Amino acid sequence: MTKQCKVSLDPAVCEMVEKARSAKVETVWDRYQAMLPQCGFGETGLCCRHCLQGPCRIDPFGGEPKLGICGATADVIVARGLDRAIAAGAASHSGHARHLAHTLKLAAKGKARDYTIKDKAKLRSVAARLGIPTEGRNIAEIALDVAEAALADFHEKDTPVMWAATTVTKKRARLFEEKGLLPKGIDYEVSDIMHRTHYGVDADPVNLLLGGLRCGVADLAGCYMGTDMADILFGTPQPVVTEANMGVLKADAVNVAVHGHNPVLSEVIVAVAKEMEAEAKAAGASGINVVGICCTGNEVLMRHGIPACTHSVSQEMALVTGALDAMVVDYQCIMPSLATVAECMGTKLITTMEIAKIPGAIHIEFSEEKAGEKAREILRLAIETFTRRRGKPVDIPPYKTKVVAGFSVEAIVKALSKLNAEDPLKPLIDQIAAGNIRGVCLFAGCNNVKVPQDQNFTAIARRLLKENVLVLATGCGAGALMRHGFMDPANVGELCGEGLKAVLTAIGEANGLGGPLPPVLHVGSCVDNSRAVALAVAVADRLGVDTDQLPVVASAAEAVAEKAVSIGTYAVALGLPTHVGVMLPVLGGPLVTKVLTDKVKELTGGYFIVDLDPESAAEKLLAAIDERRAALGLSVPGGGRR
Amino acid sequence: MIRREIFVRYDRCVGCHSCELACAISHTAARDLFGAILGGEKAQKLLWVDQVGPVKAPAVCRHCEDAPCVAVCPTGAMHRREDGLNLVNLPQCIGCWMCALACPFGAVSRGDGKAIKCDRECLDEEGVPACVRACPTGALVFKTVEEFEADRRREVVTSLK
């Protein structure tokens, strides 16, 4: 019988949790239990540590103390804390993007021989969007200009952040400009948040939130740039068939997990692994089996069909199988606890980035100039580890699902063009207008230890698909849905409502798939939430409306990272009703809560929906979709026109 | 009857006020932080963390076996229940504050003109008070006198090594 447990809906995780328990390997769920109860001041955002007179705590029930030592109110403390989370998220996404911009620059100059410009068409289209001339110029010249334009977007200059100003609708760009929401520079905005949240600067909660919103738009720029750079360097994803869950590990192969976010190293590992097959076979392995964890996994899944091992909160479980020979990590969402679990299980944990070292791990510092060499060094270590593991028992949970992924905007448009070559978006728009597609929901973000893993994602997606909502997914949200079969076309019949089923089937058949597209379209890693933005902007432009009018919603149903907060912020800035399925630390600020969940609507059209119950969250998302349909004069299921 | 008391290991108190917050939440209708805030409830804590100089310490009703608050109460509102807890029967309380005057620990408070104090209406499924459960450093412990003193003795013996 399939294993069940309280911490996860994934039977593979349940099996590994049980193994970890019997082997006395401490996991994230053990540490969470040990942390309970969590501090209520932190939970409500009412703890401030921004100066040395603190820490200050405000009574969440309105009693004393009502003010911080400096006089900051509860709302000021909450807004400052939220702003810093947004800044941290923006710094992380854009740090990833900047890294790739540097790689592109090196590649353009011929200084990084392991990198080429894989997608020249994307390079040209990005250049065109930025106003960089392409006619009669060679690829390296254009690439250098694009890389330099990207790097220039980090600081204040004569133009605003181009990856924000040129990636949203014209109406939205104008709105951002009028309302002071157009970022001056990505780093500028992160730094501005650090400045205004410093002791004794901004004490107006609404002004603080406006600063946070602008930093959220800067985060959109970072994400969008990350996607653009990766597509130019490594190719824009096209539909690909693969598998997900821990059953993708192979006892007789050298199993190497790539984990983190940036494809800059994992791309080279995937390429070098093919070259080193013979070396692995000479060591007695059936080959090298590269698998993905978190968004590094999503990047190589989207572009190469590398199978996904697991995601987010269950990353330790991949190690608990005992089947991994190496886990290679770059940065973001890598739990430091991996070092201890890896030691217990005999896996080599290899850190590769100068900014992300973990005591107990082996550090092999990556550089673009020596990427291939470093990748070979890493894989040799994995092969050597395999020779020691060879023949010893491992516990690979026998679960995996089929995944059809790779839905970049370019891939979606290409698929739609089979229905209408002149106007590829028209079939999509027609189906939305006809109600066969009621709306669109983007699932993003992480798995949070506070929620039984995948529960919120699967419950909300199940409900929305039945109601004919087209579902897109990124990051570990995509991971959650893929391991439960939501990306297997065979499940369209069971999961989707009639209208959506017909649309997915029509597109699939027009593309010679002999069946439907999968129920949920995987659009990429967490920086690739930009792809969902690009699609929404294209549809809005085609209709001559703005993104806040579209029946499009977003949900970070099990969010963890500050990056999820900044993504949610730009979703709201673009005008989307945005669900968060765990409590944001804002409830201690009544005004802040009101602004985020309601008042911000007057400014951007978007707003946050915080609801911990997946069923009622799904209802609210559907209601938000219907409200927008009605405003566009479209039919609303069950209610006719409102 | 095995009676456990709330003991304080003063050297462990870091002054985080988690006990106060947990106490207040456990006395709301929602019995949950987010629920109480969203429900607009006013919460009342029944223990206090104070700081004098570098010393931080929680003060909570000791539920004295020979309680001064009970002894001085003119109306009998402050009474000792069969299970040994000292509680206020609110309808009888006239708000004369004799109990507050008599309490050596400052553990009596004012709520709606009447005396309120720790009532242990906060126990979790294991019978542990909310303040003890919330203490992240183990400054508050819920043990019998015998257990606590045995721990103390062991600490002394260990220190002799």
Image (spheres, coloured by chain):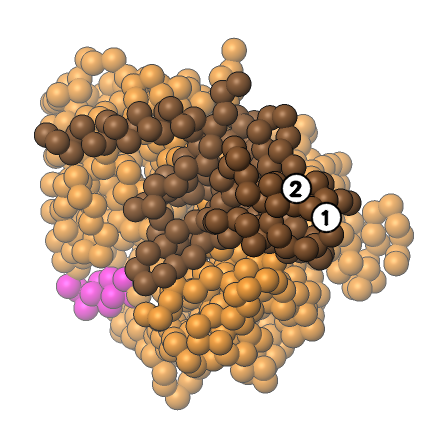
Chain colours: A orange, B brown
Q: CA distance from mark 2 to mark 1?
A: 8 Å
Q: Residues within 10 Å of mark 2 (few under 14, many from 20)?
A: many
Q: Is residue A124 above or below residue A435?
A: below
- Picture residue at 17% right of the left edge, 30% below the top: B158
> Are the two marked residues, 2 and 1, in contact with CB atoms closer than 8 angstroms?
yes
Q: Earlier in the sequence, mark 2 or mark 1?
A: 2
Residue situated in front as seen by the camera: B93 or A640 = B93
Q: Tell which subunit mark 1 falls on.
A: B
Based on the displayed image, in which of its 4 quarters is residue A144 positioned? bottom left
Q: Which residues lie in the magenta part?
A: A99-111
Residue wearing tag 1? B93
Which label belongs to residue B78? 2
Please state if A355 lies on the left or on the right of A245 as rendered: left
Residue A104 part of the magenta-drawn span: yes
The percent coordinates of residue B97 (x first, y second) are 63, 55
Please state if A135 lies on the left or on the right of A207 as rendered: left
Magenta span: helix, strand or loop, mainly? Answer: helix
Q: Secondary structure at mark 2?
A: strand
Please state if A588 lies on the left or on the right of A57 as rendered: right
Q: Is residue A319 above or below residue B74?
A: above
Q: Tell which subunit mark 2 falls on.
A: B
**Mark 2 residue type:** Met
The percent coordinates of residue A605 (x first, y second) are 67, 68
- Picture residue at 45% right of the left edge, 23% below the top: A14
Based on the displayed image, in which of its 4 quarters is residue A155 positioned? bottom left
Q: Point out the residue furthest to the bottom here.
A: A158
